[in-house]
Each structure stands twice: as C-alpha cells, then as structure tokens.
Amino acid sequence: MADRFEVGDEIKMKKPHPCGSHEWEILRVGADFRLKCLGCGHQVMVPRRLVEKNTREIRKKG
C-alpha cells in the first residue's frame, strides 16, 4: 500500500479543486504529498491519509 503512489503519477480525486478539475499530478511523496492541479497549475501540500482516502483513480507515469 505504501508503494501505491509514485512521483509523476496522475490521480483523480473525489472532490474537485476550486478551478473545477479533479486531476492532480504527484510532485512529492512522504507523510505529506505535494500535488499540482492539472487544471490551473496550483500546488498544494496534502496529508497522506487524505490523499489515500480521496483518490478514485491512479494513472501511472510512462
């Protein structure tokens, strides 16, 4: 389970960003994730447990 997420993966979250996009790119993995919104480019830090809870789909890089 810990290796499920990797830097560069794109994920679809349950709730949208205020810009309307559900799609995010993972920039950093650890206790907190740094995510970049693929709709507007905004970057946010999110606790791991919230990412694991709210992720609906993972698209692996490459």
Image (spheres, helix red, strand yellow):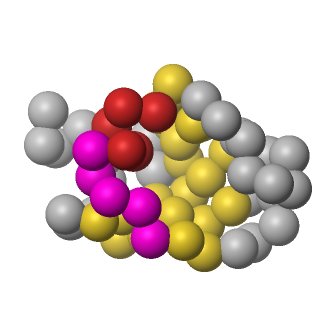
Query: Residue shown at 61%/52% (left/top)?
Result: 24
In depth, the one of 11 and 43 nearer the eye is 43
Query: Residue shown at 59%/29% (left/top)?
Result: 14
Q: Is residue 2 visible?
A: yes
Q: With respect to residue 43, does 55 lie above or below?
A: above
Q: With respect to residue 29, does 55 lie above or below?
A: above
The answer to whether 22 appears left or right of 30 in the picture is: right
Q: Is residue 20 rendered magenta in the image? A: no
Q: Main secondary structure of the magenta part?
A: strand
The answer to whether 40 appears left or right of 24 in the picture is: right
Q: With respect to residue 32, does 10 lie above or below?
A: above
In depth, the one of 45 and 25 nearer the eye is 45
> Where is residue 33, by image quadrant?
bottom left
Q: With respect to residue 54, does 36 lie above or below?
A: below
Q: Is residue 27 visible?
A: no
User: Residue furthest toward the left?
Assistant: 2
> Where is residue 6, by image quadrant?
bottom left
Query: Residue shown at 81%/54% (left/top)?
Result: 18
| Quadrant (top left/top right/bottom left/bottom right) for the N terminus | top left
Q: Which residues are magenta?
A: 45-49
Query: Residue shown at 29%/65% (left/top)?
Result: 32
Q: Position of residue 22 (x, y in %)?
A: 71, 40
The answer to whether 18 appears left or right of 13 in the picture is: right
User: How many numbered marks are there?
Assistant: 0
Q: Position of residue 12 (x, y in %)?
A: 59, 36
User: Residue furthest toward the top?
Assistant: 56
